[in-house]
Image (cartoon, rainbow, N blue to C red):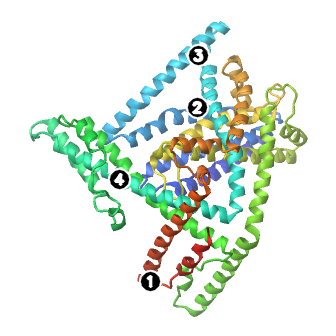
Amino acid sequence: MNASSHLVLKVVALSTFLLTFAATLVTYFANPRTSLPVKVVTTLSLALGFFGIFLLPIDLSSASSSTNDLYILWEVIFWGTSVLAWAILPLMRETLLAGEFTTISRFREGVRKVLRVLLIYLLVAIIGIIALAFKLHSFNVLPVLIALGNTYGLIIVSILLGYGLVAFPRALWRQANPESELRRTLIMFVAADEAIFDAVWQLQDCEYAIDNAISQVMDLKDDLPNDVYMKFCIDELLRRKNLTANLSSELSNRRTNHERGEGDLRNKLDSPSTLRQISKLNRNLKLAQEKLISSEVRLQFLFKRAIFYSDLVNGSKRRSSSSNLNTSIPLLSMTDSKIRSCGNYMQYFWRKYLRSHTVRIFAISSVFISSLILWCEATLAINANLSPFSFLLDLFAGGDEPMGYLIVFFSIILLIYVSICVYSSLFKLSFVDHFTLRGHKQSYGVALLFNAQYLVRLQFPLGYNYLLMMKVDTSANDCAFLKLMGKMSVFPVLGTSFSVYAPLLIIALCGFTLFHGYARLLGLLGIEHEDSILLGDKEILDGKVKEGISLLRRHLCKETEADKRQGETCTYVEMLERLNSIV
C-alpha cells in the first residue's frame, strides 16, 4: 500500500470517528425538542471543527516524508469552516431567534441580521487590503482574509486558554473532594430553584405583554390582506402562548399575583400594536418558554448530582430501583441479579477506594501540562527554542514509520488537552443565557449553533498557536498546514508578529483566574456562575447549604411518593437521614 492510500485510510477512519463523537455530543447536550436539521448541521460542524485538530498531528508526521498531499484538504477545511462559521451557522441561529411567524419571514430576518454583521467585517477587510496594497505595492486579498480571521481567533483562543489552563485542573482537583462538591451542588441547587422562579415570572411577564398587545389591536377585516396576515400572526402567538398556559401545580404556585413591569409594558403599547411588536413578543415568548424548560431540566440534573455526591460522601452505593424488577424466567432473573450485584460491588469499590486518588493523579498531571504550556507561551517571543514539547518532537522525528506514529500520538495528546481547555471555557463563558451550552439535555438549537460556530472558527487559530508553541521550523518543514497559514507572513501587523506577542495575554489571564478574579468579577456584575459559588462569607454559604438540604429533602419526598405510587420499594428514604450531617 502506497503512502497516498495509507493517508486516505487515515482520513476516512478519522472522519468516521469524529462524526460518531460529534453525534454523541449533540445527543448528550441537545434538548429533545431541538429540530433534526439543527442537530444534523451541528453534528457536521462539530465533526469538521474537530477534524482540523486531529488532522494536524497526521500532517506533522507526513511532513518528514517525500510528499505531503494534505494541502488541498486543508484548503477545503479552511474555506468550508469559514463559510459555516461566518454565514450558515449564524444564519440558522438568527433564523431560530427570529420572532416572525412564517419560515420565509424568519429566514429573511436572519439574512438581514447576518448581512449587517458581514458588511462590518467586509469594511474592515477592505481597509486591511488597501493598507496592505500601500505597504507591499501589490494587491493581496487572500492573505488579508486569512490574517483577519486568524487574528480574531487568536484573541479568543488567548482569552479562553488563559482561563482553561487554570480552571480545568482546578475542576479536576475539586472532583476529588466529594464533600466540597456536595456543598457546591447544594448551593447551586438553591440558585437553580431561584432560576425557576425567575423563569416563571419572565414567562408571566410575556403573557401579560401579549394580552396587553392583543387588546390594542384594532378591528381586523377579512377582506384586507394585511389584516388577514395580522390575524394569522395573532392566532399563532396565542397558540404558542397556550403551550405553557397549564403549568404543573408546583410551577403554578410560583406565579405572582401582580404584573411585574406593568407600567412600562403599557406605556410601550399606548398606540395600536404593529406587526413588528407582535413578532418581538413572539421572540420573547419563545426564549421565555425555552428558559423555563431548561431551568426545570437543570434542577433535575443538580438533584441527581447531589444524590451522586451524597453517595460518595457516605461511601455507599444507593441501590437502583431497577434491582427489584424480575423476569418471568427464574434462571435469567437469578443470573441478572448476580451480574447486577457484581456491578454494584465494582462501582462501590471504585467510588470508595479508587476514584479520589485517580482524579487527583489526573489533576496533578494536568497542572504539570498546564505549567509547560504556560512556559512555552511565555517564551514565544524569544528566538531561542526553549519549548520542551519541541525537544520531544525532535526526538521522535526519526523519519521511519514507528517514529511517525509517536509524533501523531504525542501531538494528539497535547492538542486534545489544549482543545479541552479552550472549548470547555467556551462552553462555560457565555454571558447570554440562551447562548450557553448547558448539561445533559438542557441546550436548545440556538446554544448548539452558537458554540458550534465558535468551535469551527477557532480550530485554525488554535492549531496555529500550537505550532508556534512547538517552535516548528517553518523553513525546513513540509507541513501543509504551515503552507496555508504561512500566507499571513506578508502582513506582519496582523500576521506572524501579532501571533507571537498576543499569547502573552494568556499568562495574565491565568493569573487572573488563579486568584479567582473571574469569579469575583462575575459576582460584582451579579451573574450567577458555578466558579463563584464558594466565594463569600462562610455563614452565608452555610445558610445556603441548609436551604439546599431543605429543597433537596422536598424533592426526595416527591421522588419517594412517586416510587410508592409505581409500586416500587422506596429508594430515597435513607438519603433523608444523611442530609443533616453534611454541614
Please name whichever residue, 63 or 532, is drawn nearer the observer in this view of the structure. 532
C-alpha gap between disc 1 and disc 4: 33 Å
Secondary structure type for disc 1 = helix
Secondary structure type for disc 2 = helix
Please name which of the two marks, 2 or 4, marks the residue nearer to the observer: 4
Image point (53%, 62%), residue name: 302
Quickly name the residue at label 3. 128
> Image quadrant of residue 522?
top right
Q: Position of residue 556 (x, y in %)?
A: 49, 74
Identified by mark 4, the residue type is Trp
Secondary structure type for disc 4 = helix
Please name which of the two marks, 1 or 4, marks the residue nearer to the observer: 4
Image point (38%, 47%), residue name: 287
Quickly name the residue at label 4. 201
C-alpha gap between disc 3 and disc 1: 69 Å
Q: Mark 2 or mark 1: name the one nearer the start of the chain.
A: 2
Q: Mark 2 or mark 3: name the one nearer the start of the chain.
A: 2
Quickly name the residue at label 1. 564
Screen quadrant of the C terminus: bottom right
Image point (68%, 18%), residue name: 493
Q: Position of residue 40 (x, y in %)?
A: 49, 49
C-alpha gap between disc 2 and disc 3: 19 Å
Residue 73, visible in the rendered structure: no
Q: Mark 2 or mark 4: name the one nearer the start of the chain.
A: 2
